[in-house]
Amino acid sequence: MRIVRHLTTRAAAVRALLLLAAAAGVLALAGCGSTPVAPDGLSSKDRKAAQAALDVLQDSNIATQLLNVTLQVENVPAACQIREVPQQPGTYQVYVFWIPWLAVEPYVWVTMNLTGDPHTSTFQLETTEPILPGGRLNKDGQSINRASIDTTLLSRYGAEQAKKSQQLLREHGGDVFTKPSAKCQLLKNGSLRLLPGA
Amino acid sequence: MVAVCAAIVGGVVAALVLTTGASDSSARLPTTGEWAPLTHSRPKVPIIGGGIPVELEPLKERKDFGTTLVTLPGKHHYEITFINISDAGVINSFQWYPPLGVHVTRLLRSSRGHCTLTGLTGFGGNQFPGVVLYPNILCEGVDLEAPTCTCLGNGGSLSIAFTADAEVKAIAAAIKLRTATLAFDRIPGFLTAGTTPATTTGSG
């Protein structure tokens, strides 16, 4: 009797161990069904799809214009953001914003709606009104040398202007910064690359 | 027991591989040369008191418009035609600042879109409500078609007729693009042998 009980106890223990092992295996394999999400709200699969949407812009006029604006305002973009449009899977909103170096140059932003088809995607460039359209004062102190440009730096206007810059940056982006939303980066050839989601 | 342990280890390894195997496609893009992040080198000029006391050369200006000036009957009556020569795409709105010493007194007509006299108000904390700084003409909704080649000058155009308080001798003024619908395909700057530029759909 005691031997039978011992065997039964041992069998139960083995059975429990096997069940535990099976459960551990299932839990480990269950990790395949879930996708880790970065702090910006995008999973690896999302990022791959977003980058593919951006890759369509390579070698296009859009890439050229992004570089032209950088040249004009003498600054790389202060913001580059991409977000999949809610309720429209596969459609992405992209926003690129520049803060000018000189006060005479305007703030510029480009907003895009990428559908995967360049013919149905939209690309809009907008600017603020320049602060000063004129040039530097002539020696008489009363007229402006129209062949020159005002070379006051925007940074001269201090913290208040910096605050205004950030306000404009957010204002014209709409809800592109709402998660899940990722930062992107302008490359030397005008392409856009998604940044890590950390 | 060994088989069970092997199964667990195998499952964990498989899970790890499957969940992290789809690496960021951005990691596959090259990262050097033209694929490196864009940086910008500014002109090496002295900066004093938040300003640059020398000329910036070459000037970084956009070349989006061609213009012609016509004198109309009547004193200081003029018509300026703005033509889209931009490689950006369709120009939706822009601002024209008259030459120094010239003030536009009345807008007579524009051939398309909506043009208004505007400028910066609120000078001196709004103590001078009648004062307008940097008076200019703002034209919106003009939708000037992109040229087929920036070399052809066949982009959309817009004419504005106005009166001024002084003689306008030349359009030595600033034209600032405000909004544009960018073209996806590049607009060429020259024609190669054998190419036939498509005609535009019409101009102003």
Image: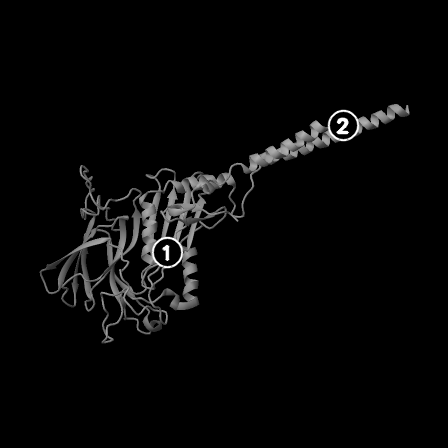
Q: Position of residue B36 (x, y in %)?
A: 41, 48
Relative to B155, say whether A137 is above or below.
below
Task: Give the letter of the chain under mark 1.
Answer: B
Q: CA distance from mark 1 to mark 2?
A: 68 Å
Q: Position of residue A81 (x, y in %)?
A: 43, 49
Please rate how many residues cluster around mark 1, counting C-alpha atoms within 10 Å: few if below 14, some from 14 to 19, many from 20. Answer: few
Res B154 visible: yes
Task: Please state if A103 lies on the left or on the right of B71 as rendered.
Answer: right
Res A87 visible: no
- Image label count: 2
Task: Give the letter of the chain under mark 2.
Answer: A
Task: Please state if A32 lies on the left or on the right of A107 as rendered.
Answer: right
Q: Position of residue A33 (x, y in %)?
A: 58, 34
Tag 1: residue type?
His
Task: Please state if B78 lies on the left or on the right of A175 as rendered.
Answer: left
Q: To which quarter of the image does residue B69 belong?
A: bottom left
Q: Which residue is mark 2?
A: A15
Q: Which residue is mark 1?
A: B40
Q: To which quarter of the image does residue A144 belong?
A: bottom left
Q: Quadrant of the N terminus of chain B?
A: top right
Q: Nearer the viewer, residue A166 or B103?
A: A166
Q: Residue at x 27, y 60 (%)?
A: B59
In this rendering, do the residues under marks 1 and 2 share a single chain? no
Relative to B67, say whether A117 is above or below.
above
Tag 2: residue type?
Arg
Relative to A167, say whether B189 is above or below.
above
Residue occupying the far right of the picture: A1
Q: Position of residue A55 (x, y in %)?
A: 39, 41
Marks 1 and 2: which is nearer the front?
1
